[in-house]
Amino acid sequence: MRYALWAPRYEAIRADLGYPFAREELAARALERLLPGRARARPLERVAARLRGRTVVVVGLAPGAGPPPLWRLPTASPAPAVVAADGATRTCLDAAIVPTAVVTDLDGPVSAEVEANGRGALVVVHAHGDNLDALEAWVPEFPGELVGSWAGAPRDGLIDVGGFTDGDRAAYLAEETGAARILLWGFDLATADDPEPAVRAVKLRKLDWAARLLDELARSASCPLAYWRRDGSFAQLGSSARSTR
């Protein structure tokens, strides 16, 4: 998605959730400093080299979803690509699936993401106002191929093709880089599992934004997008159903 189209959407998200843009700028500058030079070169081209023309399975962490049953998909060449959204990286690795790419803001099991990176996964690290400490601690630990992203205008090797949470940001990235089809596995955008009511309420607002953004992407995307449900069925995005349960 062109940044000029995405920027007003993110402004609405920031206004709703109260995110100060100055913190986003600080995080972006930190990520620019921490990324090695090779990670800032041709970021979208490097992602596209892995995803273009493929069915991309974006893996989320909905309770009970587990790893995607890739064997259920028709045999195809090229084979499906797996993009793990943050915490779903561990789910994939535990099932002997090394993701093609990982999209993360470093608030999940980052050690699993470092492991996946060392085993060949490209990791897209997202900078935002709440993860400055995580950027400093973890970015130097990644041994493999990295790409940086943030919530502002693309700059000095940092991309922004749309998306808010790790899961919907992964879908936007797959569409932008030429996926032939996008399947969302392990997505539940109607449930926030947290014992603290205030925290749960914020999480639900974030998930609602993610659902809205995915619906918008479905209406403009150049490839089909669908929820892949645990019963094996597919639900085209844009429908009212938001859970893979």
Image: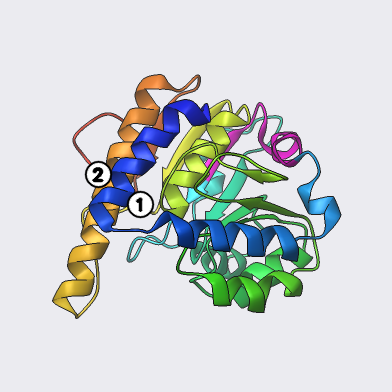
Q: Nearer the viewer, residue 125 or 65?
A: 125
- Can you give x and y, in whole percent of width and height, for residue 233 in the image? 34, 38
- Residue 53 counted in the magenta span: yes
Q: Is residue 36 left or right of residue 123?
A: right
Numbered circles on residues, count: 2
Q: Residue at x 56, y 77 (%)?
A: 133
Disc 1 marks which amino acid? Phe
- Residue tagged 2: 242
The numbered mark, 2 or 1, whose residue comes first in the sequence reads 1
Q: Furthest-left residue in view? A: 197
SS class, disc 1: loop
Asked if disc 2 and disc 1 are in contact, CB closer than 8 Å, the reply is yes
Q: Using the image as rendered, state which of residue 159 and residue 229 is in the foreground.
A: 159
Q: Which residue occupies the extreme right position in the image?
A: 38
Q: Is residue 102 above or below residue 132?
A: above
Q: Residues within 10 Å of mark 2 (few under 14, many from 20)?
A: many
Residue drawn at point x = 80 percent, y = 68 percent? 143
Question: Where is residue 30 drawn, in percent x and y?
Answer: 65, 65
Residue 8 on the magenta segment: no
Q: Is residue 195 left or right of residue 114?
A: left
Disc 1 designates what residue?
Answer: 187
As measured in the structure, the alpha-carbon distance from the residue carrying label 2 to the one carrying label 1 is 8 Å
Query: Which span of residues is magenta-colored?
Result: 43-57
**Residue occupying the point 28% across, 58% down:** 18
